[in-house]
Amino acid sequence: MQHLLDEISETRSLTSTLATSDERLAKLLKWISPLESQKKHDDIRSKRLNGTGKWFLRSQEFKTWIGDSQDHDESRILVCYGITGAGKTIMTSLVIDYLLDTSFSTKTVGVVYLYCDYGNRNTQNPDSMMRLLLKQAIEAVRNLGKNFINLIDPLFEQQERGKLDLEDVCKFLVQSIAKFTKSYLCIDALDECGDGHRGILLPSLRRVLEGCDDNTVRLFLTGRPQVDQNINRHLKLGGHPVITSIMLEANADDIPNYVLHSIEMNEDDESMNESLKNDIMDRILQTSEQMLVLTARTTSPFND
């Protein structure tokens, strides 16, 4: 009987210790960053039509970037440029979901991300953005269960001192993502991060890339064409690492899905019939094809 009571007491003690540990970790993560990335991602994903962007995931540039290619000239950095409304943020959400699915299935891939937003300038500065990436990386390592205590103990010490500068954040981010066989950092809408902030954020990202093995960390960025100079200045020093870029435009594979969805969302059901639906679809597709040809002939990827 006493033996049973001792076991019950030990179990309660262990449960209490784990609860205290979880509470302590939650406070640490909130101290690192009170921001959350999941809600923003969920909101964007909810607006993405099924099938959108599949062509991008099949592209040689994307396959090479993720390492799913026979091309030995692998690029660690993939940048998607596009004008306002080109679908950069939707594409980012698609890439993040693809990578998260890979992470869930393999358990050895780390994925961290953030969406820049001009409307959140007060909280979205280089320090807070890098802290948000670190917070996600720590949560991912926790799920991995690999040398987690060795990673967070120094962070608890930093918390007690109340000090965690940008250099520390980069250092701990490198240590966190090094726990994975491969890690991906995704940042959307760099153009919505001010010039001064980009001048700090991009070198910080480069520091993370340089702190990891060549083939373990990949960076995905999107932005309007004018951020090209910032990216090349801060990330492409001496030609390394290789930067691959894609110009996002209206894609022939995505347009039919969007047009059909818009028609089906039309509340004026009485005037809509199959013949009218087909006529609308044909006319828009013909116009879009002409626009795509015109864009291909007249638009330079790096003109505002």
Image (spheres, rainbow, N blue to C red):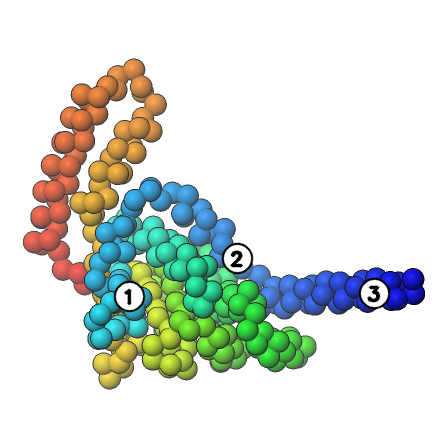
- Residue type pointed to by label 1: Asp
Residue 228 occupies which quadrant of the picture?
A: bottom left
* Disc 1 target residue: 68
Viewer-proximal residue among 86 and 229: 86
Name the outermost residue toward the top.
Answer: 270
Q: Which residue is drawn at 31% across and 28% down?
A: 264
Foreground label between 1 and 2:
1
Give left or right: position of 38 versus 226.
right
- Residue type pointed to by label 3: Glu
Foreground label between 3 and 1:
3
The quarter of the image holding the N terminus is bottom right
Give left or right: position of 152 versus 267.
right
- Residue type pointed to by label 2: Glu
Q: Which residue is drawn at 33% across and 42% down?
A: 50
* Residue 26: percent from left, percent from top: 64, 63
Name the outermost residue toward the right.
Answer: 2
Mark 2 lies on a secondary structure that is: loop
* Disc 2 target residue: 36
From what the image shows, is residue 290 above or below residue 172? Answer: above
From what the image shows, is residue 280 above or below residue 185? Answer: above
Viewer-proximal residue among 237 and 16: 16
